[in-house]
Amino acid sequence: MPLLAAPLLLALLPAAPPTRPFATLAAPRASALPMMQLFGGPKLDAREADFQRRQEKLASRKAANAQPKGQVTVTFPQKGNKQVTAQQGEPIGAVCKRAGVRVKFDCKTGRCATCQVRLNGRSAVKVCQGATVPGGATKKLTITLDNP
């Protein structure tokens, strides 16, 4: 009896839908080809367009960084107005070391503000956090230690 029930159950199951080969799924429709040619080729989706825009922005930044950096005259009033020439973007810690100015450190994470210096008497930066000589139109810079 179980042998007779098996053909009957197979007859009751729905048939699988016909499948298309993968090549027809990947190829664009024939009607879409003239439209792509009419509008200048295949359109980029949003992700590809965003990626392309970011790559162009990165290339322009690299080109801007490739330009030679300007010279800045750095003055240390606590060291008898000692002057040192530095490049824009150079770490302030390296400039202080070259000038013979010792910057005190305590936590080396920027929390304690022991390494804080003032640029031109205004903005305070922390040497331990990798502060650099500012760029732009700056040609003269005065670095004053908050904790001499």
Image (cartoon, grey):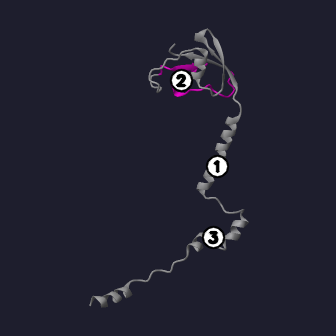
**Residue depicted at 59% across the width and 22% down the height:** 94
The answer to whether the residues at label 2 and label 1 have Cβ atoms under 8 Å apart is: no
Q: Which residues are magenta?
A: 113-139
Q: Considering the numbered disc 3 on the image, is that residue within a helix, a strand or a loop?
A: loop
Relative to 33, 8 lies left or right: left
Specify the amino acid type for callout 1. Arg
User: In which quadrant is the N terminus drawn?
Assistant: bottom left
Q: Earlier in the sequence, mark 2 or mark 1?
A: 1
The alpha-carbon separation of the residues under discs 2 and 3 comes to 59 Å
Q: Is residue 1 above or below residue 27?
A: below
**Residue depicted at 65% across the width and 17% down the height:** 84
Q: Picture coordinates of residue 3 (x, y %)?
A: 30, 89
**Residue depicted at 72% across the width and 66% down the height:** 37
Q: In this rendering, which labeled residue sits more in front, label 2 or label 1? A: 2
The alpha-carbon separation of the residues under discs 3 and 1 comes to 26 Å
The answer to whether residue 114 is magenta is: yes
The label on residue 127 is 2
Q: Which residue is mark 3?
A: 28
Q: Which residue is mark 1?
A: 53
Q: Considering the numbered disc 2 on the image, is that residue within a helix, a strand or a loop?
A: helix
Specify the amino acid type for callout 2. Val
Q: Residues within 10 Å of mark 1 (few under 14, many from 20)?
A: few
Q: Residue furthest left?
A: 1
Q: Picture coordinates of residue 61 (x, y %)?
A: 66, 39
Q: Quadrant of residue 102?
A: top right
Q: Residues within 10 Å of mark 3 (few under 14, many from 20)?
A: few
Q: Considering the numbered disc 1 on the image, is that residue within a helix, a strand or a loop?
A: helix
Q: Is residue 11 above or below residue 135?
A: below
